[in-house]
Image: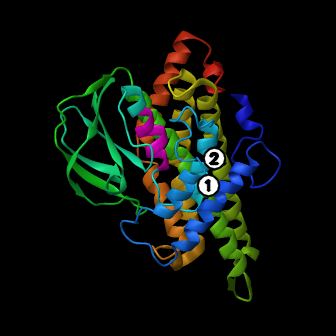
């Protein structure tokens, strides 16, 4: 997995890497969506059907859940990061890496087009809060957790109450008609949560990149006492610290993407790398968000400003699929097990 730190897929746009063309395509879809939605955001933010159509037309909506797509986690991670950087309101992670994967694993048939979403709850639940994009979904995959086992079915909503997360993304409360038949998928509960945590780390990185870009532009263009804010040493130090924190998050996320691409979501390598990434992002996001808003002063704190979309979505994403504390405890247990059973240095450097 050391190749994650020798280039990776989340570097500067452009270049001659294998993914340059795909990156330009994803960034183009994201930039058009962002520009089209200026002045039209709300709470909750509306599903962007136009952007979703572009993703489907380009064959990017189900890269990992469709075996014929030719794509994989690396390509999906690149697209998720680009869409998050431009605050595109579509459930790509839910459709591909979560609902599409679980439906296929359970042998359930879902629509071949349109967004999907997943409703995760405890065994026996019929009312499930925090379901992403439920109102826009062509199908809702219901995943009820019973220990390591999932009871899976296609949900038939009786009611959908709209809601949103900190960044305005749809997070709905769904009450379902209790399915008569479930498909039992053994040992999939942890992988489902790991997949969600992986996606949220990638998305958070995209939002942090946007926050830094906005802060650099703002301090360069805004003048105070006859010179740009960026000319002040304290501002330069804050920008440098932000950039350093984001690069720390990028390294951890690159490791998670490489682990999943090389070994799969159900591997011990992915368990380690995604846990590390979730802990790192959980600590980096508050630091970068605070600094970005300090640099913007009073103008970055409402939905009308582009910074709000980046920072608030990042703050919401880091607490989904396990908060920082729960992942830190899991990382600690992994470290203790490594110290007991082998060389702890192998664990520290991710060598398996």
Residue 69 x, y percent position in the rendering? 59, 37
| Left or right: where 277 falls relative to 156 | right
Question: Foreground residue, 256 or 224?
Answer: 256
Q: Secondary structure at mark 1?
A: helix
Per the image, the residue denoted by label 2 is: 78
Residue 94 included in the magenta stretch of the image: yes
Q: Residue furthest top?
A: 341
Classify residue 43 by image quadrant.
bottom left
To which residue does mark 1 refer?
Answer: 82
**Residue drawn 51% across and 34% down?**
275
Give the percent coordinates (x, y) of residue 286. 51, 56
Tell me the crowding category of disc 2: few under 14, some 14 to 19, or many 20 or more residues within 10 angstroms, Cα based: many
Q: Is residue 285 left or right of residue 20?
A: left
Residue for point 62% across, 37% down: 71
Q: Would you place residue 287 above or below residue 331 in this image? A: below
Quick one: which residue is furthest to the bottom in this view?
Answer: 226
Mark 2, secondary structure of its residue:
helix
- Please tell me in which quadrant of the rendered image residue 306 appears: bottom right
Discs 1, 2 touching: Cβ within 8 Å = yes
Question: For the magenta stretch, what is the residue range?
Answer: 92-102
Instruction: Place residue 274 in its image quadrant.
Output: top right
Q: Is residue 57 left or right of residue 247?
A: left
Prevalent SS, magenta region: helix
């Amino acid at each position: 997995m050391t190749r994650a730190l020798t280039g990776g897929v989340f570097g500067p746009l452009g270049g001659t890497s294998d993914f340059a063309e795909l990156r330009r395509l994803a960034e183009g879809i994201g930039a058009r969506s962002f520009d089209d939605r200026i002045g039209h955001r709300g709470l909750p933010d509306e599903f962007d059907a136009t952007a979703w159509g572009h993703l489907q037309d380009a064959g990017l909506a189900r890269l990992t859940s469709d075996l014929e797509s030719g794509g994989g986690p690396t390509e999906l991670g690149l697209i998720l990061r680009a869409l998050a950087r431009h605050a595109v309101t579509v459930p790509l992670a839910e459709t591909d890496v979560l609902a599409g994967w679980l439906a296929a694993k359970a042998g359930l048939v879902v629509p071949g087009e349109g967004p999907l979403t997943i409703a995760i709850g405890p065994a026996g639940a019929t009312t499930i809060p925090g379901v992403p994009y439920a109102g826009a979904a062509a199908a809702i995959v219901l995943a009820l957790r019973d220990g390591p086992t999932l009871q899976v079915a296609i949900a038939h909503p009786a009611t959908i109450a709209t809601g949103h997360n900190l960044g305005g993304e749809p997070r709905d409360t769904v009450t379902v008609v209790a399915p008569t038949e479930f498909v039992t998928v053994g040992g999939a509960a942890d992988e489902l949560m790991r997949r969600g945590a992986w996606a949220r780390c990638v998305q958070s990185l995209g939002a942090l990149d946007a926050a830094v870009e906005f802060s650099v532009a703002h301090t360069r263009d805004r003048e105070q006492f006859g010179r740009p804010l960026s000319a002040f040493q304290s501002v330069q130090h804050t920008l440098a610290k932000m950039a350093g924190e984001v690069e720390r998050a990028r390294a951890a996320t690159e490791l998670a993407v490489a682990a999943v691409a090389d070994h799969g979501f159900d591997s011990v390598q992915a368990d380690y790398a995604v846990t590390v990434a979730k802990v790192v992002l959980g600590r980096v996001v508050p630091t970068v968000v605070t600094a970005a808003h300090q640099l913007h002063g009073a103008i970055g704190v409402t939905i009308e400003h582009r910074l709000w979309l980046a920072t608030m979505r990042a703050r919401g994403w880091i607490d989904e699929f396990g908060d920082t504390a729960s992942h830190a405890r899991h990382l600690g247990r992994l470290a203790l097990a490594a110290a007991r059973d082998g060389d702890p240095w192998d664990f520290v450097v991710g060598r398996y």
